[in-house]
Amino acid sequence: MPAFLNYLQELYNSLAVLFSEYENNDKAICYAEKAERVYHQIHSMGKTTDRFGSNLFRHLKAQTLEPETKKFQHCFYFEGGIHHVKTEKLYTHTLFYKAQILTKIGLKKQAAEYCGLTMKRQYEMNDYEIRDWCYNCINLSEYYTENGYFA
């Protein structure tokens, strides 16, 4: 199972987006929460020493399932394994999708929190477009200012 958690995380994110686009926000939020649980499951499998869990992923690399090429020469197979950068990027996407879904549901305060978490992770991982990030920062600050959340 650990070898395919990234695929499961990506699948739940995709389902969250799909159901959100079809205005089935109850299912969409459930899948976003499942993706979030998979992320936490990956991190609960071992101790981490840095913010991106480098020790965890070194430990899991030894458990990675390698495809047997002799058996599957003519078949399609997925290469398993947990990639720590992909795990973190997928989780950032999960937070972003969850913020969008919460906005659609009308839970704006929670959506703003998830937007802030998404932006914080993008900044820490240096994975953002500066123009978009600044624009989102301005919009988020406007929300907090309009609602009196100055702290």
Image (cartoon, grey):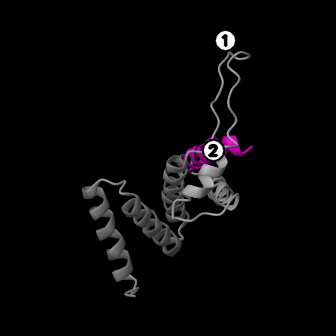
Residue 86 or 25: which is nearer the viewer?
Answer: 86
Q: Main secondary structure of the magenta part?
A: helix
Q: Residue 18: say if magenta.
A: yes
Residue 74 or 99: which is nearer the viewer?
Answer: 74
User: Which residue does the numbered mark 1 point to in the structure image?
Assistant: 74
Q: Is residue 5 left or right of residue 151?
A: right
Is the Cβ of the residue at disc 1 closer than 8 Å to that at disc 2?
no
The percent coordinates of residue 77 (x first, y second) are 66, 24
Q: Residues within 10 Å of mark 2 (few under 14, many from 20)?
A: some
Q: Looking at numbered disc 2 in the image, what kind of residue is underneath it? A: Lys
Q: Which quadrant would residue 149 be assigned to in this image?
A: bottom left
Q: Looking at numbered disc 1 in the image, what kind of residue is underneath it? A: His
Q: Which quadrant would residue 132 be assigned to in this image?
A: bottom left
Q: Is any atom of residue 40 visible in this view?
A: yes
Q: Residue at x 70, y 17 (%)?
A: 72
Q: Nearer the viewer, mark 1 or mark 2?
A: 2
Q: Residues within 10 Å of mark 1 (few under 14, many from 20)?
A: few
Which residue occupies the extreme top position in the image?
Answer: 74
Image quarter hosting the N terminus: top right
Mark 2 or mark 1, which is nearer the start of the sequence? 2
Residue 136, placed above or below residue 76: below
The percent coordinates of residue 148 (x first, y second) are 39, 87
Q: Which mark is residue 61?
A: 2
Image quarter hosting the C terminus: bottom left
Q: Is any atom of residue 24 visible in this view?
A: no
Q: Residue at x 30, y 53 (%)?
A: 129
- Report the span colored magenta: 1-20
